[in-house]
């Protein structure tokens, strides 16, 4: 599979500490620990599940692109915590943490520095349909009714920032 090695690295970082998900020309980054990578429509794809309550959600919908930045070391663990606990609606997270985001190579958004980066163009979106979801998962994860939107991004560029 194309990007096999890099996707493996991405998957290793999901579920645990998470990765950075960025969108917007005036960028914003959030932490994401759910998602998957694979093949569909003969294309390498990353699917990013994002709740509609996230500021980043609107940015992806508007711009139809996003980047994923996977830290190359554990030095960024605290940053992952920070970017996953405050909203770009309220603060400029980069300014607060003195991070200079890096311009993407082929998208009108940015990646985080010192990461393995995936640039993705949105090619499909669907929503979790609550009537079709397992009751236990619904009760366990969606007390707030904020069912994830699944953003399917075609991977168009992978590199280290
Ligand atoms: C480790 C970790 C993993 C997270 N994973 C996700 C995720 O996969 N999807 C999601 O919608 N929110 C996830 N979040 C929550 C968002 O990162 C958090 O709500 C963030 O503040 C949203 O920022 P924004 O409003 O600037 O977009 C995660 C948070 C943490 C700390």
Image (cartoon, rainbow, N blue to C red):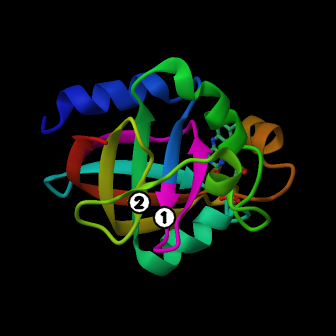
Give the quadrant of the N terminus. top left
Q: Main secondary structure of the magenta part?
A: strand
> Residue 114's image quarter?
top left
The image shows residue 140, relative to residue 154, as above or below, that is above
Specify the label residue 144 is tagged with.
none
Q: In this rendering, would 113 be left or right of 149?
A: left
The image shows residue 137, relative to residue 94, as above or below, that is above
What residue did someone put label 1 on?
23
**Residue 85 spot, x, y in % from top left:** 76, 44
**Residue labelled 2 has its Cβ within 8 Å of some atom of ligand 1:** no
Give the quadrant of the C terminus. top left
Residue 32 in magenta stretch: yes
Secondary structure of the residue carrying numbered label 2: strand
The one of 61 and 22 positioned closer to us in this rendering: 22
**Residue 79 spot, x, y in % from top left:** 63, 35
Number of numbered labels in the structure image: 2
**Residue labelled 1 has its Cβ within 8 Å of some atom of ligand 1:** no
Taking the spot 35% from the left edge, 72% from the top edge, the residue there is 108
Taking the spot 46% from the left edge, 74% from the top edge, the residue there is 25
Q: CA distance from mark 2 to mark 1?
A: 7 Å
Instruction: Please rate how many residues cluster around mark 2, counting C-alpha atoms within 10 Å: few if below 14, some from 14 to 19, many from 20.
Output: many
What residue did someone put label 2 on?
110
Taking the spot 52% from the left edge, 66% from the top edge, the residue there is 27
**Residue 143 spot, x, y in % from top left:** 86, 49
> Residue 65's image quarter?
bottom left
Sequence-wise first label, 2 or 1? 1
What range of the chain is rendered magenta? Answer: 22-39
Q: In this rendering, would 123 be left or right of 78?
A: left
The image shows residue 128, relative to residue 20, as above or below, that is below
Taking the spot 49% from the left edge, 56% from the top edge, the residue there is 22
């Amino acid at each position: 599979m194309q990007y096999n090695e890099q996707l493996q690295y991405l998957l290793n970082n999901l579920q645990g500490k998470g990765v950075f998900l960025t969108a917007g020309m005036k960028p914003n980054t959030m932490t994401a620990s759910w998602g998957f990578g694979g093949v569909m429509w003969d294309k390498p794809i990353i699917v990013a599940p994002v709740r509609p309550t996230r500021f980043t959600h609107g940015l992806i919908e508007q711009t139809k692109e996003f980047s994923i930045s996977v830290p190359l070391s554990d030095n960024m663990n605290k940053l992952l915590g920070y970017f996953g606990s405050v909203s770009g609606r309220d603060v400029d997270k980069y300014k607060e943490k003195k991070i200079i985001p890096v311009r993407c190579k082929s998208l009108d958004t940015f990646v985080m520095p010192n990461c393995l980066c995936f640039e993705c163009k949105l090619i499909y979106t669907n929503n979790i349909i609550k009537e079709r979801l397992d009751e236990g998962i619904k009760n366990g994860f969606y007390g707030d009714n904020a069912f994830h939107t699944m953003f399917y991004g075609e991977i168009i560029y992978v590199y280290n920032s």
